[in-house]
Amino acid sequence: MMKMTTMRCLLQPFHRSLSRTLLCLTLDAAGRRHITTFTTTATKDSEETSCLDCSTATCSFFCPTCNNIKKTISKNCSHFDILGLPTKYDLSNEDIDIAYKKLQKRLHPDLHHQSPDTSSLAASYSTKVNMACDVLTDPVLRGQHLMLVNYGVDPLKEGTPSLEDPELLMFVMEARQEIEDVETENAETLHQHHRKMMNEVVKDLTLQFNNGKSSMDDQLKTLIKLQYVSKMVDEIQHRTPVM
């Protein structure tokens, strides 16, 4: 029998499959080289515990090391964290949309059908992404969520004391009376007026959030005004037959 001497073996790491290959380079008595392969199969448990970063509690749905979908994420993730966006009010719908589509592409069911567990995780994370997108694209909800993150209090939650500002209350009363009195044919003009007003309030709130000297009460007052104007815009739109 020809004598074989092992020179070197290389064990290929696990990737997407559960199998890996042992490559061995050997040298026989005549000096000829031979490559021998051995294929081994790992259990699911060994694959899932092979990467320590998979169990790290962060707000990312995917492990940064092995790129596998994680079984759990941190319980303290804001909607900004979920979409991987900076925690600030001044976000464009385009930035939010790009982050949303990027995550939903990676969470697509076709990429996670290998097992019921991964499929369920992807569906659960996709729901979180949808919710984060809905909140952050709405200027009122985005401001509400940012104040919750910054101050630990939901400023618009039912039962939370609100500012009883006489100027703000007068503004709301006059605006509501204007809506009640508007004729159908003039509703579109009034709608455009309030849309413009809403954009101006969003700008004011953006400046306040960006200004480190702005108080919580100032931000709350502007947020409540934005909430009222937003409701008025919706109400006028429902009164208008064709917009």
Image (cartoon, rainbow, N blue to C red):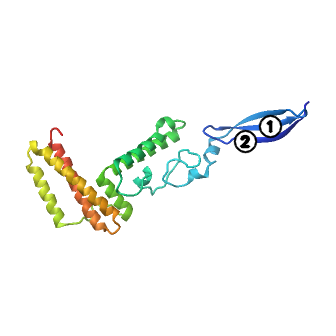
Q: Nearer the viewer, residue 206 or 234?
A: 206
Q: Is residue 16 above or below residue 95?
A: above
Residue 108 in the image: x percent, y percent?
46, 38
Which amino acid, mark 2?
Answer: Leu
On the rendered image, what quadrant is the C terminus found in?
A: top left
Secondary element at image label 1: strand
Q: Is residue 67 above or below residue 222?
A: above
Q: Which residue is mark 2?
A: 11
Residue 235 in the image: x percent, y percent?
18, 48
Please state if 38 lies on the left or on the right of 158 as rendered. Answer: right
Q: Which residue is mark 1?
A: 25
Q: Can residue 240 be seen by looking at this rendering? A: yes
The residue lying at 88 percent from left, 34 percent from top is 31
**Of all residues shown, which one is farthest toward the top?**
1
Using the image, tell me which numbered label, if any, was put on residue 175.
Answer: none
Secondary element at image label 2: strand
Q: Can residue 156 be seen by looking at this rendering? A: no
Q: Is residue 172 above or below residue 97?
A: below
Lower sequence index among marks 2 and 1: 2
Give the alpha-carbon distance from disc 2 to disc 1, as whole Å. 12 Å
